[in-house]
Amino acid sequence: KLARLKNTHKMTKTMKMVSATKLRKAQKAQKDAGTFEEKLNGIVGRLGVEVSPDDHPFLNPKKAPGKALVVVFTSDKGLCGGFNSNLNRKTAEWLLNNASRLKQIEMSFSGRRGWVFFKNKFTVNKHYEGVAIKPQFTDALRIGNDLQTAFLDGQFDEIHVAYNQITGVLTHKPVVEKLIPMDTGMLGSNPKQTEMGMWIFQPDRQELLLANIPRLINLRIYS
C-alpha cells in the first residue's frame, strides 16, 4: 500500500508540473492578445476626437433591436469546478432578463459544455466544435467573419458573447457583453483636439476605421 501511495504521489506531481506548464502558456497567450488589443484600441482612438456610431456599421446600434445572437464560450470537458456551470447560469439569467426586449434569440457555441446545456432550450445557430481545446486565431477569424456577415446581412440586430473573464490564477467571473454593435466607449482614450495635428493618417481616417474595427472584433473573440 505504501508503494502504491508513493507511485500515486509521483504521478500526481508529474500531472501538476504538466498542468502548470500549460497554465503558463495559456496565461502568456492571453497576455499577448490583450496587449495587441490594447494597442489596436489606441490606434483607433487616435483616428478622431470622437468616434461616432455613423463611422462604421459595427458601431451603429439599431433603434429597436428584435433579433439577437448569443455566442457562448465554454470548455469542451468538465471537471473544472464552476468554470462552465457558473457561465451557463449567468447566460441563462441574461436570456431570461432580455426575453421581453428581444423577439428572437439564437445561440452559437464554442465549447461543448455550453452546447450540451442549451441545445434543447434555444435555436442553435452554429456549434464550433474543437476550437476550445487549442485556441487558434484562424478559428477566431472564422467565427468573427460568420458573426460580422450575419450582422451586416440583417440576420441579427445584436450579437453578444458569454465567457469567463479571468481575474486571477484560479478565479474567474462570468460575463455576457455586447460584441456587435461595439460600444464606442471601449475604443480607448481619444486624443484632445489640440493633439490632432500631431497625427498623419495614411490611408485616410475612414478607410482605417473600416479596416480596423473588424480586426478589433476578431481579436476580442480570440482573447
Image (cartoon, grey):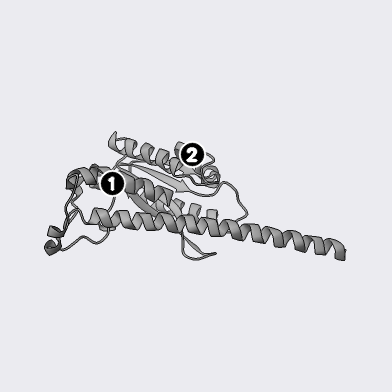
Residue ID at (29%, 41%) = 157
Compared with residue 146, is residue 187 higher up or lower down, i.e. above or below?
A: below
Q: Position of residue 112 (x, y in %)?
A: 55, 44
Q: Give residue 181's position: percent from left, percent from top.
A: 28, 47
Residue 137 got which mark?
none
Q: Which mark is residue 128?
A: 2
Q: Residue at x 51, y 49 (%)?
A: 74
Q: Secondary structure at mark 2?
A: strand
Q: Which residue is mark 1?
A: 212
Query: What is the three-letter code of the residue carrying label 1?
Result: Asn
* Any part of residue 90 in sight: no
Q: CA distance from mark 2 to mark 1?
A: 25 Å
First in sequence: mark 2 or mark 1?
2
Q: Is residue 210 left or right of residue 139?
A: left
Task: State which mark lies toward you, 2 or 1.
Answer: 1
> What is the x, y in percent for residue 150?
34, 36
Q: Secondary structure at mark 1?
A: helix
Please state which of residues 96 and 75 is positioned toward the viewer in this rendering.
Answer: 75
**Relative to 125, is 181 above or below?**
below
Q: Residue 118: horizontal and vertical position, in percent?
A: 50, 44
Q: Residues within 10 Å of mark 2 (few under 14, many from 20)?
A: some
Query: Label 2 amino acid?
Result: Tyr
